[in-house]
Image (tube, rainbow, N blue to C red):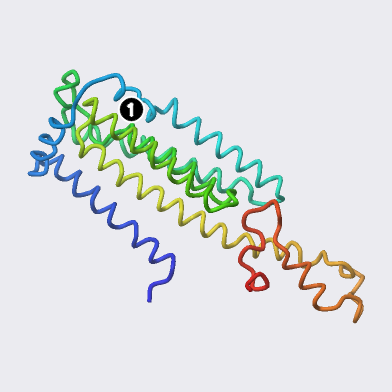
């Protein structure tokens, strides 16, 4: 049976394959472009609402949201005494840095024309606004989730991120800024980048309880260099209670230790 990381990596294959398929169809003017253009003609209705929704995918809007969330979670992690408090926040910014490195060359290579609703030009595939929104808002949600204490708050965060991405996507297609396949391809690209970040953050969370245990193992009362613990000074139940109590300020520490299992 595949290990958990292997299964997570396999989960990245479907969006990656779909992204490659759409890219091939666009580059080769394949049969998928016909239905794509007909769907666009049926959905396009230029208006102010579409423009406003599409603007949520601007770098000037989405990137500050991600930076603020990353800074806040780093501050919380540092306050909780995490030795690697900066790692999740920096990791959340890395997929955002990859977006232009992937999207810009693809735009130049595919050289896809725009819809009739925009001035004649090329380089519309894939949608940079959709990729920016998916990665920026998605990374912000992933790095924020561990600090949310209730299931309702976590569901609200996920729903908000998804709603923002869907709003940007709808605005782009409705206004005619992009063909539908441009948007779908950017969804796939975002899914791959977010899936990779999620896998990294899960591995980081799994190592945090071990690190916390190592740091606390030599700080129990009655122990330390040159002062061994005296027999009977602390009953086993007392020592177990003190080492297994989860931190009230850290989202991971003590969350997956055997002592916390009912």
Is residue 121 left or right of 214 when viewed as pictured? left
Where residue 100 sits, quadrant-wise, is top left
Instruction: Identify whether 230 is placed above or below 38.
Output: below
- Look at 24% across and 54% down and name the residue there: 17
Q: Between residue 239 and residue 228, name the one nearer to us.
A: 239
The quadrant in which the C terminus is found is bottom right
SS under mark 1: helix
- Identify whether 229 is placed above or below 67: below
- In the rendered structure, the answer to whether residue 19 lies left or right of residue 70 reads left
Q: Quadrant of residue 244?
A: bottom right
Residue at 59%, 62% (x, y): give it: 207
Image position of 202 (left or right of 258): left
Q: Residue at x 91, y 76 (%)?
A: 233
Q: Which quarter shows the N terminus?
A: bottom left
Name the residue beneath numbered marker 1. Answer: 54
Name the residue furthest front.
Answer: 152
Q: Position of residue 110 (x, y in %)?
A: 19, 36
As drawn, is 91 to the left or to the right of 31? right
Residue at point 56%, 43% (across, down): 89
Q: Nearer the viewer, residue 196 or 118?
A: 118
Q: Of 246 and 13, which appears nearest the observer?
A: 246
Give percent across and percent down for residue 99: 37, 38
């Amino acid at each position: 049976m595949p290990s958990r990381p292997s299964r997570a990596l396999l989960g990245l294959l479907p969006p990656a394959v779909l992204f490659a398929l759409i890219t091939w169809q666009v580059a080769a003017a394949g049969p998928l472009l016909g239905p794509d253009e007909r769907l666009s003609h049926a959905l396009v209705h230029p208006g102010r609402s579409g423009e406003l929704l599409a603007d949520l995918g601007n770098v000037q809007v989405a990137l500050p949201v991600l930076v603020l969330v990353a800074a806040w979670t780093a501050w919380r992690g540092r306050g909780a005494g995490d030795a690697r408090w900066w790692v999740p926040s920096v990791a959340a910014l890395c997929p955002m840095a990859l977006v232009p490195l992937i999207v810009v060359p693809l735009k130049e290579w595919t050289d896809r024309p725009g819809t009739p609703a925009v001035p004649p030009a090329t380089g519309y595939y894939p949608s940079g606004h959709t990729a920016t929104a998916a990665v920026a808002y998605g990374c912000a949600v992933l790095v924020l989730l561990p600090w949310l204490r209730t299931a309702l708050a976590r569901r609200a965060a996920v729903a908000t991120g998804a709603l923002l991405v869907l709003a940007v996507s709808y605005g782009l297609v409705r206004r005619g800024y992009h063909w539908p396949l441009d948007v779908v391809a950017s969804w796939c690209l975002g899914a791959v980048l977010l899936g990779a970040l999620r896998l990294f953050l899960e591995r980081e969370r799994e190592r945090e309880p071990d690190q916390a245990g190592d740091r606390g193992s030599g700080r129990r009362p009655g122990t330390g260099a040159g002062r061994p613990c005296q027999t009977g000074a602390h009953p086993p139940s007392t020592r177990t209670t003190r080492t297994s109590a989860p931190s009230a300020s850290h989202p991971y520490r003590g969350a997956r230790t055997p002592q916390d299992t009912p």
